[in-house]
Image (tube, helix red, strand yellow):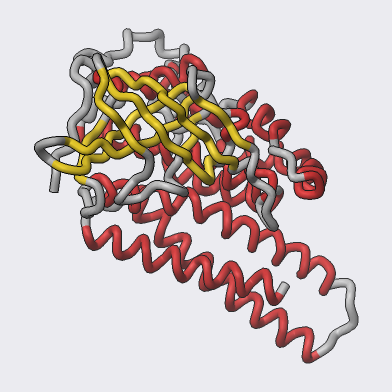
Amino acid sequence: MGKVTEPAGSGPASDNKVPDMPLDTATPETSAASIDWLARAEALAQTIAAQAAAHDADDSFVADAYAQLKAEGFFKALVPVEFGGGGAETSDICQVIRRLGAACGSTALAFAMHSHLVAVAAWRWRKQGAPTEGLLKRVAAEDLVLVSSGGSDWLASGGEAVKVEGGFAINARKAFSSGCLAGDLLVTSAVWDDPEAGPTVLHFAVPLKAQGVEIVETWRTLGMRGTGSHDVVLTQVFVPEAAISGRRPSGPWHPLFHIISMIAFALIYSAYLGVADGARARALEITRRKSPDPHLAEQVGAMENAFASAEMAWERMVDTAQNGVPGPDSTNRAMICRTLLAQGAIATVERA
């Protein structure tokens, strides 16, 4: 397995000490720690739900929901307070995404794609001392929205990186780039044919307004229409050598994916549990207005069993994301739970 390397000079600051404050004055840390993120999501949920049908009907991106989430600080919620963020735990935002999913699945899923990138960067800074401080500080200070190309890139990656003076020229088409219409940075990768090491995946971030970056609006599909998961096309986009945040062989499993699997899937699949949550709630509301019926009771029981299996799998995923140790066991657990959650969520909605 190849070594992941990162640009020098951007590691965690050596002194993050907060100056002493009077006892009656809250520090940023205590203020951030007291934020009830789920309550904030609950306050927005009704408004976001009312907007959802229109986005689904006309295939439009949930731009209004994104603006509302940004105004409440959700896009920087997972950034450590030391860097100006909200200091939220991964488990907090899993709860938030689940609640948003019950209101608007598209909003929840698109937001999850941003959130998992921030959560992984924050985890790596805390646990490994990885040089992700610069990205995290920018997310907080500039209120950046990150866009993942993970839906079209996995171990092999896609696209071509050609060595040029000072860096690389990138040509690629990245599908399923959820939230790209409101995005600031595309966190992505491409393959460089290293003359010594062979096909090597380069990881980097590209401003979505950079020269050579184009959003091609291809996303018009049944379900989750409002995620705006269009293609992002990179044509001769220059990425400086110093902006390459990681290198690994194309194809083989890399330890970085143990971290991604442990954290990202818990956040992403919270959106799907939320959709099931919403369908179940609406079905129960209708059922309570009907006359008692043994067949209906049996159907409700089947729905409740399916939902319980999805929720239990989700709880295990969230606990692993929050408290687990990256490695084969955690990855295996996350993959099993995502399968069980998906099966349970689909069955819940079918029965609802």
Q: Is residue 319 left or right of residue 282?
A: left
Q: Residue 296: x, y in percent? A: 78, 84
For the view shown, which residue lies furthest in the left direction? Answer: 196
Residue drawn 58% across the image and 67% down it: 345
Drawn side of residue 250 relative to residue 44, left or right: left
Q: Residue furthest bottom?
A: 294
Q: How many marks?
A: 0
246 in relation to 24, above or below: below
Say which residue appears at 30% left-offset and 26% top-offset: 132
Q: Nearer the viewer, residue 326 or 320?
A: 326
| Above or below for 238 versus 308 | above
Quarter in which the C terminus is drawn: bottom right
Going 73% across and 63% down the picture, which residue do you hit? 281
Residue at the image position 41 percent from the left and 37 percent from the top? 117
* Between 172 and 330, the one nearer to me in the picture: 172
- In the rendered image, residue 32, in percent from the top left (x then y), is placed at 47, 26
In this rendering, the answer to whether 114 lies above or below 108 is above
Residue 10 shown left or right of residue 237 in the figure:
left
Q: Position of residue 6 (x, y in %)?
A: 21, 27
Quarter of the view holding residue 15: top left
Residue 220 in the image: state x and y as whole percent. 69, 49
Q: Is residue 1 above or below residue 222?
A: above
